[in-house]
């Protein structure tokens, strides 16, 4: 995919491999809002606005190198889609979500965001995380995602007050299970070992662990299984209730591209059901 990097600006010169709606609304991120002329994105303490033009899209941003990495612009998704299109089950999902890219997101923001996401809907997840930013984040163009230290200062009652519900106790505890280096240190682990580490954290179950592995650590050899993926699996393959077995079977089918396959399937299945 061709793009031009300029000061505080990235010009995407194609619409085939980049579509902000597909990228931001496929379940991998919550730090965004749809606006009249496009989208705004605010990961960590950064900010970008994405608008469409005749050629493709323009990303106006505070740090073009940060967002070049964040949107994974150097990866050739054309090659990936060509490989995955060989699977019958993926042909329609890839055509539907052709502009999906897996974002490279901050590990701490991913951990907290996906603990909040458990058994939750996107509107409510964004509301809770927005309150978290407003209460604890550094004020700038938008409120930054809070630091580990800022979150450690608050207890379960605070997290209940911002609407986290039963997840409040997980948030209050998990920030004391980690330090500012440990999530980065775990990058050296293989995926099964890293998954075990994540599952040891309060509030992190199998699906949340796989989401953090995929969207935070960039591990494509995972396959998060939720209600939509289970439904798709039972419609296309054979009926199966055990989500861990479904996960294992799908990993066996899609291998090292499992994570990307999951995003096409999830986005298509969820969108087609609305």
Image (spheres, rainbow, N blue to C red):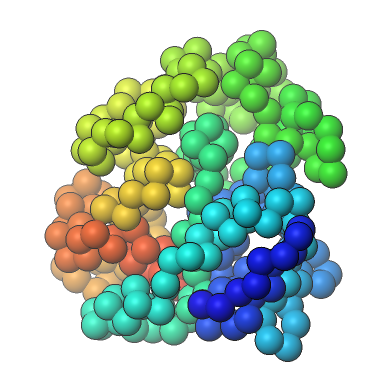
Q: Please give the name of the residue rendered at 23% of the width and 32% of the height, measured from the top-left corner.
A: 193
- Answer yes or no: is residue 164 visible: yes
In the picture shown, does residue 193 fall above or below 272?
above
Quarter of image, res 237: bottom left
Quadrant where the C terminus sits is bottom right
**Looking at this view, is 38 or 125 the one in front?**
38
- Answer yes or no: is residue 241 visible: no
**Looking at this view, is 119 or 59 the one in front?**
59
Lateral position of residue 237 relative to residue 31, left or right: left
Lateral position of residue 45 relative to residue 102, left or right: right
Number of on-image labels: 0
Percent position of residue 142, x then y: 81, 42
**Looking at this view, is 149 or 30 the one in front?**
149
Percent position of residue 55, x then y: 68, 86
Please identify the residue farthest to the bottom as the structure is shown: 54
Percent position of residue 220, x then y: 32, 55
Percent position of residue 54, x then y: 73, 88
Q: Please give the name of the residue rendered at 59% of the width and 28% of the height, measured from the top-left corner.
A: 165
In the picture shown, does residue 93 fall above or below 202?
below
Quarter of image, res 151: top right
Q: Please give the name of the residue rendered at 28% of the width and 63% of the height, measured from the top-left corner.
A: 257
């Amino acid at each position: 995919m061709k793009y031009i990097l300029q000061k505080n600006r990235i010009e995407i010169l194609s619409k085939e491999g980049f579509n902000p709606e597909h990228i931001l609304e496929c379940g991998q991120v919550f730090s965004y809002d749809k606006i009249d002329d496009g989208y705004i994105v605010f990961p960590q303490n950064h900010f970008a606005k994405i608008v469409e033009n005749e050629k493709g899209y323009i990303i106006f941003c505070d740090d073009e190198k940060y967002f070049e990495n964040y949107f994974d612009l150097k990866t050739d998704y054309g090659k990936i889609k060509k490989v995955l299109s060989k699977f019958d089950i993926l042909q329609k999902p890839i055509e539907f979500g052709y502009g999906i890219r897996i974002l490279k997101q901050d590990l701490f923001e991913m951990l907290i965001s996906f603990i909040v996401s458990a058994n939750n809907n996107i509107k409510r997840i964004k509301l809770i995380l927005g309150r978290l930013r407003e209460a604890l984040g550094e004020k700038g163009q938008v409120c930054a995602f809070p630091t580990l230290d800022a979150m450690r200062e608050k207890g379960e009652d605070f997290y209940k007050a911002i609407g986290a519900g039963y997840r409040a106790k997980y948030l209050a505890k998990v920030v004391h299970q980690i330090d500012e280096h440990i999530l980065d240190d775990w990058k050296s682990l293989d995926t099964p070992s890293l998954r075990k580490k994540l599952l040891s954290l309060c509030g992190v179950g199998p699906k949340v662990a796989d989401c953090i592995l995929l969207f935070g650590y960039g591990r494509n050899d995972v396959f998060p299984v939720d209600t939509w993926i289970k439904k798709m699996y039972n419609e296309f393959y054979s009926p199966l209730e055990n989500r861990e077995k479904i996960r294992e079977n799908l990993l066996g089918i899609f291998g090292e591209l499992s994570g990307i396959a999951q995003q096409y399937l999830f986005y298509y299945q969820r969108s087609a059901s609305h």
